[in-house]
Each structure stands twice: as C-alpha cells, then as structure tokens.
Image: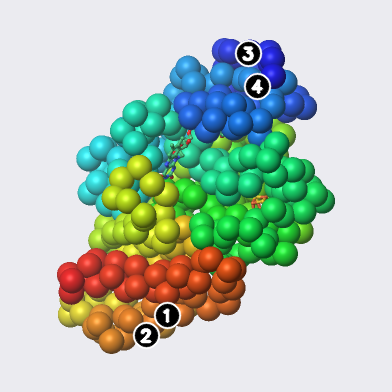
Amino acid sequence: MRDFTYQRPASLAEARNAAALPGAMLLAGGTTLLDLAKCGVAAPETVIDISHLPGLASIEVGLQGARIGALAKMSAVADNAGIIREFPAVSEALWQSASAQLRNMATIGGNLLQRTRCAYFRDPSGFPACNKRNPGSGCSALGGVTRNHAVLGASPSCIATNPGDLAVALVAFDAQVELGARTVALEDFLLTPGDHPERETDLQPGEIIAAVSIPASVAARRSTYLKVRDRQSYEFAAASATVGIEFEPDGRTIRDLRVALGGVATRPWRARNVEDALKGKVLEPDAVRRASLLAMEGAIAQADNHYKIELAPRVVARALLKTGALA
Ligand code: FAD
Ligand code: SF4
C-alpha cells in the first residue's frame, strides 16, 4: 500500500473540488477502499474523507417514496421502519449483504460503487492481464476459472460480475442517483463493460453521490429479495432476484411487475422481458416458470458458470411465487 495524502473537507462543495483532482479517491465507510488499497488495485494519491460530512446520512420515507443519504449506513437503512414497510426488498437485500460488522461501517454510496469480486482483478501481481485494472492488457478470467463470472452483459473485454445486492433491489424500483448538479437512473449509472471495462459508472471527476431516491409504488410495497449463495451468510450471490408485484383488485391478475437479477450479470439486470410476459396474466406456477426462463435470454456461459443459466430462472420463479403468496 503506497503513501497517500489524507484530506478531511469541511463541506460537500469542498469535497467535490478535492475529488476532481487526479489521483483522488473518496473514503466513506472504507470497507471497499481499504481492501483494494491493500491488494494493490487502488493506489490513491489523495484520500478524501467524507464520512463526517453533515446532512448526508438521513433516511426519509414519505408518500412519494424514499430518499436515502449516501452516508447512511447499510444497517440503518435495513432497519428503518419506513423502508421495511414501503420497500421490503431493499431491507432484505441489505440484511443479506456482507456481515453485521461491515453493514455497520459501510455506506449506501460506497455500496453502489463497490468493485467486482473477480479474483483476477484483485490479484495484480499474480495476474497482470486485466482490462478493468489496466486497459488493453487482456482478461485473465477468459480461459481461467469462471464459476463466479457473468453470463449476461459481458463482452470480449470483461466478464466480471457486479457483486452488489442493494443495487438489484434499487434497479427494480427505478431508483435515481443524486449527484449534485444532475440526477440519473441507477440503471444507466452502472455501465456494462463493452470495450471499456475500466469505466464502471457514469460518475464524472468531482461528482459525489449525495443521495439515492426511490419512487413509491404498490409493487415495491409487495416485494422480496431472494439470494442464493454457496453458504447462508457472508457470501456473494450465485444468483439473486428482486421481485415486486401489484395485483388487480381480483388479487390474482398482475397489474405491475418488477424483476431484477443479481450475481449473474455485469450490472444489476432488469428482466423486462419477464415483466412483460406476465403483466395482465394470472399469477400461477406454470406461467411463472415459463416466463422466468426469459430472464436468461441472451445469456452466454463460460466454462464453469453454466449453472447460473439453470439457477437464475429458478430463483426468479421462486421469488415470484413467494411474493405472490403461492409458495
Ligand atoms: P468505501 O470503501 O468508503 O468506498 C467505496 C468506493 O466508493 C470508493 O471508490 C469511494 O471512493 C467511493 N465512494 C464512497 N462513497 C461515495 C460517494 N458518496 N460518492 C462517490 N463515491 C463514493 N456487498 C454486497 O452488496 N453484498 C455482499 O454480500 C457483500 N459482502 C461483502 C463481504 C466482504 C468481506 C466485504 C469486504 C465486502 C462485502 N460487500 C458486500 C461490499 C460492501 O457492502 C462494500 O464494501 C461497502 O458497501 C462499501 O461501502 P463503504 O462506505 O465502506 O465504501
Ligand atoms: Fe479483469 Fe474483467 Fe477479466 Fe476479471 S473479467 S480479469 S475484471 S477484465
């Protein structure tokens, strides 16, 4: 880990100016940044500590939706009564993330900007070839061990999975990221790799996430986050799904549906084809299982991750049946 300069700005405006300088990185909870600095992936010249900035940790839930400050801790959001009532999938996604210690340190802004868990990315001395770390150097994962890599949204340059849980729930409910001068949909903010896997987000120099807002919806109020992983806690998703359902007054026909996947794609993956196939239909097991297969449309497996193409539709189907009280 190389030496760096530490700054503690007094205001968000001051922090934005400092963040615009080359080699600057923000420190919120520090649980990602310190990890990456220790393994040699991150080498900031200046660390800008924003953890103490006032006014960025509030959690407001009202009739229009929720607004969550970027410095709100994962555990505080998971435990918030308004979030549990209006956005249960958001609370569940957070509760199933990381460990209690990490959730008490880590922030919502930092969570959305966490980096991939691709083992080759995190081992610069063992695997110099990584287009995400070092553009143009190649991809050590291609032809390597690919059990945890993406089957959706990958490119010949990078097949790394987005590991986040919270972002899957947020994308399902059209969350927006507030960046100060502009606000963007989270789904557009998180990028697929294409030819430039080094660009993971639309964050511009000097921009800081101030808050995330989620519009209220009936589907969000009736929602679930289902995460399947190698062990029951402290593990990233092999496949996960957020599902939210609004029924017609008959209580059986689907009026609005949200489906998003995690653990299988290069960014949180909204499955609009599954949503469109089921809207207007009666929720019943056979239709659900057929529609869930659409979630893997366009999926491409590597040597070791074909199981994700089998697993993800089952996770979507189980989440749909659970949310619809059929399982
Ligand atoms: P930091 O480390 O402070 O920052 C992370 C990055 O975001 C840095 O690049 C920083 O510059 C930038 N940043 C931070 N805040 C802002 C802001 N407001 N605006 C702009 N840039 C900002 N996550 C899951 O979703 N599911 C899991 O199961 C899971 N398991 C984990 C297991 C382990 C062992 C570890 C170490 C992490 C795990 N995580 C998991 C990731 C964890 O949730 C993140 O490390 C954490 O959320 C990052 O938040 P932070 O505040 O500590 O970010
Ligand atoms: Fe790097 Fe992406 Fe290849 Fe992993 S999959 S080694 S992050 S280029």
Specify the quadrant of the image occupied by residue 250: bottom left
Alpha carbon distance from label 3 to label 4: 18 Å
The residue to which callout 1 is attached is: 293
The residue to which callout 4 is attached is: 1
Disc 3 crowd, CA 10 A, few/some/many (<14, 14-19, 20+): some
Q: Is residue 263 left or right of residue 233?
A: right
Question: Going from the N terminus, do you reach mark 3 or mark 4 first?
Answer: 4
Question: Going from the N terminus, do you reach mark 2 or mark 3 first?
Answer: 3
Q: Amino acid at mark 1?
A: Leu
Alpha carbon distance from label 1 to label 2: 6 Å
Residue at left offset 58%, top offset 77%: 298
Disc 1 crowd, CA 10 A, few/some/many (<14, 14-19, 20+): some
Q: Which mark is residue 7?
A: 3
Helix, strand or loop under label 2: helix
Helix, strand or loop under label 1: helix
The residue to which callout 2 is attached is: 290
Q: Is residue 253 above or below residue 227?
A: below
Q: Are marks 2 and 4 in contact (CB under 8 Å)?
A: no
Whole-percent x, y for residue 286 in the image: 28, 87
Whole-percent x, y for residue 247 in the image: 25, 73
Residue at left offset 34%, top offset 29%: 101
Alpha carbon distance from label 2 to label 4: 50 Å
Q: Is residue 32 above or below residue 302?
A: above
Q: Amino acid at mark 2?
A: Arg
Whole-percent x, y for residue 158 in the image: 68, 57
Q: Is residue 217 visible?
A: no
Specify the quadrant of the image occupied by residue 279: bottom left
Q: Nearer the viewer, residue 172 or 44?
A: 44
Q: Are marks 3 and 4 in contact (CB under 8 Å)?
A: no
Alpha carbon distance from label 1 to label 4: 45 Å
